[in-house]
Image: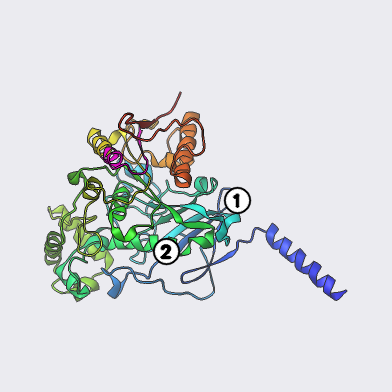
Amino acid sequence: MKTIVKILLAALLLGAASCSGKQPVLKVEGGQIQGIASAAKGVTVFKGIPYAAPPVDSLRWREPQPVIPWEGVKVADTFGPIPWQDDLSGMDLYGKEFYSDGMPEMSEDCLYLNVWAPTRSLGKGRKKLPVALWIHGGAFDHGFSNEITFDGDAWASKDVILVTINYREGVFGFLGHRFLAEEEGAMGRSGNYGLYDQLAALDWVRDNIQAFGGDPDNITLFGQSAGARSVQTLVSAPITNGKIAKAIIQSGGGINPELQGREKNYIEVWAMGEYFCRFSGYETLEQMRAASPEELLKKYDEYVGLGGNIPLGPMTDMNIFGRSFSTAASINELPNIPFMIGSTDGDGIQKAKDIDQFCAARVYYKSEPVYEYLFKRKLPGDDAGAFHSAELWYVFGTLDRCWRPFTEADYKLSADMVDAWTNFCKYGNPNGKKKDSPWRPFTDGDPFRMEWDVKE
C-alpha cells in the first residue's frame, strides 16, 4: 500500500512540475544549464551561454580558450555583456532603427551565445533538428547578438534551432602586431581574433547542439554585412570543411576582391597595429594588455579620427585564413554546399553584379544549387528605402519591435521570408517541399533572382 502511495505521489509531483512549465536541465561544455520559456508558445530560450573563457588580462588578443566550468545549474535567463564598442544610439538612421534603447552592458568578457529551441526537443538528440548559426554585422566594430531585430521565436516555431553569438570587435578583435605574433610563435596568427571566436562558437555548436535536439551535421551558417563577410571567410577556410552544411550570405557581396574588403596580408596588418600602439604610447605587450578597455576604445577613436587606419575584419594569415572568398569561389575551392545569397536594393548595383558573378561561378562548377535574392521593400515611415540592413526585421519576424508603421502586407512578406530562410536550413531549398517553386535556383539559362517586396 505504501509503495502504491509513493508511486501516486511521485506521479502527482511530476505532473505538477510539468504543468508549472519547469524547464529541463541540459549538460553542455562547462556544466549544466537551464533555459526559460520564451514569448512564443513551445519555445525555450537560453541566454548568455559561455562558449569560451573570458578573453581578459593575459587572454586579451589571444585565440579563444576553453570554457571555464561552473558549479550547479546555470539558469540562462540573461544575455551576456556585449563587446566593447562605441554608443551608436545617436546615429541618424541606424541609431533610431536599431539602438534607440541605448547600449547594454559592455565587457571584454563577451564570448556568449544564445539558443532558441522548441521545448519538446530539449534533451532529445534524436530529434536532429536543423540548426542556424547567426553572425551579426556592424563593420567589425559594433553590433551584438541580442540586438532588437534578432530573435529566434519565429524560427524555433518552425522547428529550426537558432543560435546567435557575440565575438570580439574593433581593436579588441582585429588588432595585428608583431609582438602578438612573436608571443604565439607562429607567423600570421595575429589579428583575426574575432574570426577565431566565431570558429570557436561553430565548434561549440557542433559539440553541444544535440543537447537541444539539434543536428550537428545540419548547421546553416548565416550573417549580414560584416557577418556575411565572416560567413564567407569561414566557408573559405579548409578547417571548416564538413562543419557547415549550408550558408546564407546577406549583403556581403560576391566575387570582387576589392569589395570583399580589407583582406590585407599579415605584414600590412602588423604595421598598422604598430602605428596605433605608438600613437597610444604603448611600447610593450605588457603596456598594451594593462590598458583599460575604455582607454583602448578612446585611443582607437582618436587614432581613426586623425586619419589612422586599423584594417578591421578578415585578413589572410598563415594559419587557417589563407585565401579570400573571392579567390576560393573563383577557383572552385569552396565546399560543395547550397548557398543563398543576396542584398537589399539600397546596397547598390555593384554588389548585385558581384553576387551574380558568384552565382555564375557556382553554376559553372556544377556545384550544389545557389539561390539569389534582392530585398526591394522600401520601409514605411520615412524615405530611407530598402536600406542596408532593412531586411533584418523581416528575416527574424520581429516587425512588432520596430517603430515603423508596418502594414499587413509587411507581416505577410516577413512570414514568407521566415518560411524561405527556415526551409533553406531544413532542405537546402527555400521552397521547402512545395511542388510549385516560386524561388528557382540560379542557372545559366535562367539567372533567377527572387525579389522580396510587399504586394499591396
Residue 410: tell me if it is visible. Answer: yes
Label 1 residue SS: loop
Q: Nearer the viewer, mark 2 or mark 1?
A: 2
**Label disc, if present, on residue 204 of the rendered structure:** 2
* Above/below status of 404 relative to 262: above
Mark 2 / mark 1, whichever is N-terminal: 1
Residue 448 inside the magenta-drawn segment:
no
Image point (25%, 34%), residue name: 348
Q: How many badges with numbers are in the image?
A: 2
**Does residue 373 belong to the magenta stretch?**
yes
Q: Which residue is situated farthest in the top direction here?
A: 456
Residue at position x 76%, y 65% in the image: 11
User: Split into 4 quadrants, where in the image is the N terminus?
Assistant: bottom right
Q: Position of residue 32 (x, y in %)?
A: 53, 70
Identify the mark at residue 42; answer none if there is no mark: 1
> Mark 1 Cα within 10 Å, few/some/many (few <14, many 20+)?
some
How far is disc 2 from disc 1 in space, using C-alphas? 24 Å
At 39% across and 60% down in the image, what residue appears?
A: 202
Report x, y in % for residue 3: 83, 74
User: In the visual, does 316 lie left or right of 204?
Assistant: left
Which of 312 and 91 lies nearest the eye of the viewer? 312
Q: Position of residue 126 (x, y in %)?
A: 57, 58
Q: Is residue 99 left or right of residue 278?
A: right
What is the quadrant of residue 120 in the picture?
bottom right
Q: Are marks 2 and 1 in contact (CB under 8 Å)?
A: no
Q: Which of the two residues, 140 or 349, is positioned nearer the viewer here?
A: 349
Segment colored magenta: 358-376
Within-10-Å neighbours for mark 2: few <14, some 14–19, many 20+? many
The amino acid type, in three-letter code, at marker 2 is Trp
Q: Position of residue 374 (x, y in %)?
A: 34, 34
Against 186, residue 119 (above or below) is: above
